[in-house]
Each structure stands twice: as C-alpha cells, then as structure tokens.
Amino acid sequence: MKTTSYFEQKLLERPEIQREWCRRVLSNPLKVAIQPNGRVSYWAAIGEYENRVLRVIVLEDGETVHNAYFDRNFLSRLKRGLEP
C-alpha cells in the first residue's frame, strides 16, 4: 500500500487506526466518492471498532493513501440522503 508522509503522520496521531483496516476499506467499500479536488474517498464499517465508519482518502492516482479517520456522522448523513 503506497502512502503519503501526511498519512504516516496521521497514523501516529491516531493509533486506533490499523493499516489492515485501511486496506479492507479500499478493497470492500460501503461507498466511494470522487472529491472536487480529484481525490477519492472510500468508506466502510469496521466491525472490530464498534462498527464505526472509517473514511480512507487516496490521491488522484487512485492508489496512494493520503488520510484515514473515523467519520462520526457518515451513517446519519447517508440516511438523510446528504451523501452523494
């Protein structure tokens, strides 16, 4: 898995996020969306972490992971039709 230095720094700040979870989100997403800047966001629930939804963002090349974080409001936005 290719990553940016920004992602590596964020993993240090967010030790609860596991690299394997990021791989899983990318290979089996609940949702995928292209951001206005060309980056791609992937979302998936992480069963081992109370089914919280992890968002993983890759660069425009489609493979380099740039960021990952738990998206607290994703499911409520999705239910209300606010997710693209």
Image (spheres, grey):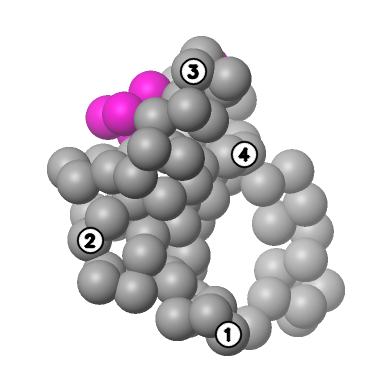
Q: Position of residue 16 (x, y in %)?
A: 52, 17
Looking at the rendering, the stretch of residues picked out in magenta corresponds to 16-21
Q: What residue is shown at x 27% (from left), y 55% (from top)?
A: 64
Q: Which numbered disc flags the more N-terminal residue, 1 or 4?
A: 1
Residue 36: assigned label: 1
Where is residue 9 drawn, in percent x and y? 48, 28
- The disc at residue 63 is 2
Mark 4 vs mark 2: in front:
2
Determine crowd level at label 3: few under 14, some 14-19, many 20+ residues with C-alpha closer than 10 A. few
Observer-nearest of 9 and 82: 9
Q: Residue at left 39%, top 30%?
A: 8
In-image side of 19 versus 73 (left or right): left
Q: Is residue 17 magenta?
A: yes
Tag 3–tag 4 contact (CB < 8 Å): no
In whole angstroms, how far apart are the C-alphas of marks 3 and 1? 27 Å
Q: Is residue 23 above or below residue 42?
A: above
54 vs 60, nearest the viewer: 60
Q: Disc 3 marks which residue?
A: 12
